[in-house]
Amino acid sequence: MSEAGAQAGPTSGLVELALICPQQWVDTVSDALMELQALAVTVEDADAETEDEQALFGEPGLPPPRAGWQRSILKALFADQAAATEAVTLLLAQDFAVDLHVQGLQTVDEQDWVRLTQSQFAPVPITADFWIVPSWHTAPAQARTVMQLDPGLAFGTGTHPTTRMCLRWLAAHPPQGQRVLDYGCGSGILAIAAGLLGATEIDAVDIDPAAVQAARDNSEANGVRLRIGMPELAHGPYALVLANILATPLKLLAPLLCGHLAPGAPLVLAGLLERQVEDMAAVYAPWLRLSVADQEDGWVLMTGRR
């Protein structure tokens, strides 16, 4: 299931509108529903668990075999019956409505909706005693280091292999008392982990204002002090530099990232596929020797020291 938006706050009498929509109109209809004051829009495969079900995702790093499901169910949440009825009336008046089919309108208990959304996100173990725990869950008894992190708009909830590998590396090499840079911080997850594991001065930077705000909110929720901002915030040498982005920007950033390394400091790079290892090592060779430190599901973690 993919989510186009979620803005619902405390309301009562929520109503869910369900539509059957062909693939070519999913984005248009989803955008239209949000413009018509939908609180949230989710997209599901209309042929799931039937002989017509089709896989949507391909191999890591390769384009998906198709842009979307042949037929999708769009479910839009509205504040009340009147808002839902007005929205579907306006939708059906549009040119593309000939391909839309209304599946139904039904009242949804707010607690059921919240419970359904939250049930998709469980505590994530990084090591036996280091866990990422959504705010609505209780930390497992064995957890000694706990990060509270709720899903949001910025990349980084601890479920993606690249993030898990970075966190495992940090847990195995706690940056006690160190100055750390998290470049391309997303949700701030790596910077916060560094703080929980003993780093004393942490800069977290990103080009996306939404990521900057998410990192700020998450650091406050975890009681970790970060300096958070746009890339120009980073300055001087660091005892550890982390960058979980993707191969192309990591290549372009090689001089900058290596320039922020103190003598002997480790550089930790993620967002890389196995087939990109040799190319990445060659790009960084003028500054340091990169090698694979971890791998998972076709992704690799590379590290090196200045």
Image (spheres, helix red, strand yellow):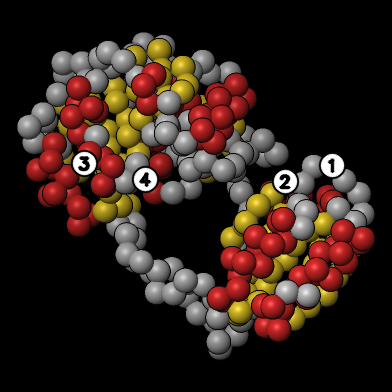
Q: Label 4, on which residue?
A: 162
Mark 3 Cα shell of 10 Å, populated few (<14), some (14-19), many (≥20): some
Callout 3 amino acid: Lys
Tell me which residue sits at (8%, 36%) in the image.
285
Which of discs 4 and 2 lies nearer the camera? The answer is: 2
Tell me which residue sits at (51%, 72%) in the image.
68
**Is 170 situated left or right of 195 in this image?**
left
Callout 2 amino acid: Gln
Q: Label 3, on which residue?
A: 251
> Can the viewer see residue 54?
yes
Between the C-alphas of marks 3 and 4, the distance is 17 Å
Camera-side residue of 92 and 176: 92
In this rendering, is residue 77 above or below 47? above
**Quadrant in which residue 84 is drawn:** bottom right
CB contact under 8 Å: marks 3 and 4: no
Q: Earlier in the sequence, mark 1 or mark 3?
A: 1
Q: Label 1, on which residue?
A: 10
Mark 1 Cα shell of 10 Å, populated few (<14), some (14-19), many (≥20): few
Camera-side residue of 3 and 306: 3
Q: Earlier in the sequence, mark 3 or mark 4?
A: 4
Q: Label 2, on which residue?
A: 7
Which of discs 1 and 3 lies nearer the camera? The answer is: 3
- Estimate the x, y position of residue 295 in percent, counting from the top left: 28, 49
CB contact under 8 Å: marks 1 and 4: no
Callout 4 amino acid: Thr
